[in-house]
Image (cartoon, helix red, strand yellow):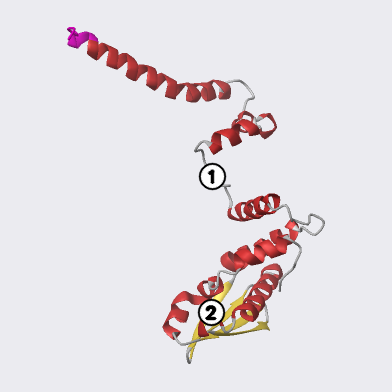
Amino acid sequence: MPFRSPVKHSEAIRRTDMTAFLNRLAPVALMTALLAIPGMTAAQTMDHSKMDHSAMMAQMSGGGPTEAGQGAFAAIAEIVAILQADPMTDWSKVNIEALRQHLIDMDNVTLLAQVVEADVDGGAVFTVTSPDAAVAASIRRMTLSHAATMTGSGGWIMAAEEAPNGAVLTVTGPDAAQIRALGFIGVMTVGMHHQAHHLALARGQMPH
């Protein structure tokens, strides 16, 4: 076996490490240099009109990022991909805007609604309101449709009615402790019907 000098071997390792470090540093140095140009901003260095989106998609297919960046956007993107992959899609009926409006309702109810919970025999009653008229309308649409769709499922009885600035949802069932622990928004997720609802909305079928 040929003799290899320990000194030369260690120098070769250091050169390899330095090369790798400089390769990692190059993009950062380039960005720094661009930002140093008078009048150049970070936004200009990320001008979407100048990006090669086809190259980005190819990179993603090779193990790049998959998150769309925002929940509603990702939900719409998923539905659009399903519709495009289905040769039976009737594009004359597709209504992506209806889905977007429904996702706005979901966002309003999830993040902006005010909920007051009270125990009743076998479950709970949730008074869901908002001083904002748009959010109150979202509450009514979401709560009344969910109760109508899911009552009887799993032995739960759901009843909803309109109220000033929102709606009142009463839920009872064989496990009152579970209903109370889930609270209003937990109860609203039960049933996993939202995904099918989103696809039906996008197809122009307008369920409930």
Q: Which segment did they paint magenta?
A: 1-8
- Number of numbered discs overlaid on the protein picture: 2
Which residue is found at the position 50% from the left and 85% from the top? 118
Is 2 a magenta residue? Answer: yes
Which residue is found at the position 58% from the left and 34% from the top? 58
In the displayed structure, would residue 37 be above or below residue 5? below
Q: Quadrant of the N terminus?
A: top left
- Give residue 40's position: percent from left, percent from top: 62, 25
On residue 66, which mark appears?
1
In the displayed structure, would residue 74 be above or below residue 34? below
- Give the residue type at disc 2: Val
- Assign a secondary structure to mark 2: strand
Q: Main secondary structure of the magenta part?
A: loop
- Give residue 66's position: percent from left, percent from top: 54, 44
* Foreground of the two, 7 or 46: 7
Q: In this image, 37 relative to 13: left or right? A: right
- Assign a secondary structure to mark 1: loop
Is 167 a magenta residue? Answer: no
Q: Quadrant of the C terminus?
A: bottom right
In terms of image quadrants, where is residue 54?
A: top right
Between marks 1 and 2 in the image, the one whose residue lies nearer the viewer: 1
- Give residue 44's position: percent from left, percent from top: 64, 30
- Give the residue type at disc 1: Thr
In the displayed structure, would residue 152 be above or below residue 207? below
Which residue is found at the position 47% from the left and 80% from the top? 179
Residue occupied by mark 2: 116
